Image (spheres, grey):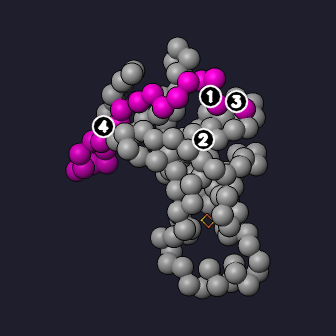
Amino acid sequence: MAVDTKKTEAPKGEESQTYTFVTVCKSDDLPEGEVQQLKARNKEIAVGRLVGGQLFAVGGRCSHLFARLGKGTLNGTNLKCPWHNAEFDVTDGCVAKWVQDSMLLKAVYDATLPAFMKRGIPTYEIKEENGDVLVAVD
Ligand code: FES
């Protein structure tokens, strides 16, 4: 397994965090337009390849009710959750569309869910080397 550790610049007064690139799958396992639910150092992540070839790695659980985003579908750069169709932009982790169920359900979700459940998802650095796909996790 390839391991490549780097330190990032920490804000003043805070300790730098170390991220390590770990192999998560083979390049051939990720055809364009596909996403998979994988693990990197026990962290659940959704890893995929956009149409055009760009790889991405994001948190593996939806911020709404924690569905596995690796079971979702891609719509451009948006990853659609398989449960209630919220969409997250995989380039920055931001919510692109919130829950897309009926207007009534959407109103109930909006009124009752705490803000932390409506936030985006984490993104991770990703690269390919020698036919492997590696993701940087802490
Ligand atoms: S669990 Fe993802 S939108 Fe509900």
What's the residue type where badge 3 is placed? Pro
> CB at mark 2 closer than 8 A to ligand 1?
no
Residue 71: x and y in percent read 63, 50
Q: Residue at x 73, y 38 (%)?
A: 33
Q: Nearer the viewer, mark 4 or mark 2?
A: 2
C-alpha separation, residue under disc 4 versus residue under disc 3: 30 Å
Q: Quadrant of the C terminus?
A: top left
The part of the chain drawn in magenta is: 10-32
Q: Are marks 1 and 3 in contact (CB under 8 Å)?
A: no
What is the total number of numbered labels drawn onto the structure image? 4
> Which type of secondary structure does the marked residue at label 2 adopt?
strand
Give the crowd class for mark 4: few <14, some 14-19, many >=20 residues within 10 Å. Answer: few
Q: Toward the viewer: 14 or 12?
A: 14
Residue marked by disc 2:
36
Residue marked by disc 3:
31
> Which type of secondary structure does the marked residue at label 3 adopt?
loop
Residue marked by disc 4:
18
Residue marked by disc 1:
29
Q: Are marks 2 and 3 in contact (CB under 8 Å)?
A: no
Q: Residue at x 48, y 70 (%)?
A: 116
C-alpha separation, residue under disc 1 versus residue under disc 3: 6 Å
What's the residue type where badge 1 is placed? Asp
Residue 62: x and y in percent read 56, 60
C-alpha separation, residue under disc 2 versus residue under disc 1: 9 Å
> Which type of secondary structure does the marked residue at label 4 adopt?
strand
Q: Are marks 2 and 1 in contact (CB under 8 Å)?
A: yes
What's the residue type where badge 4 is placed? Thr
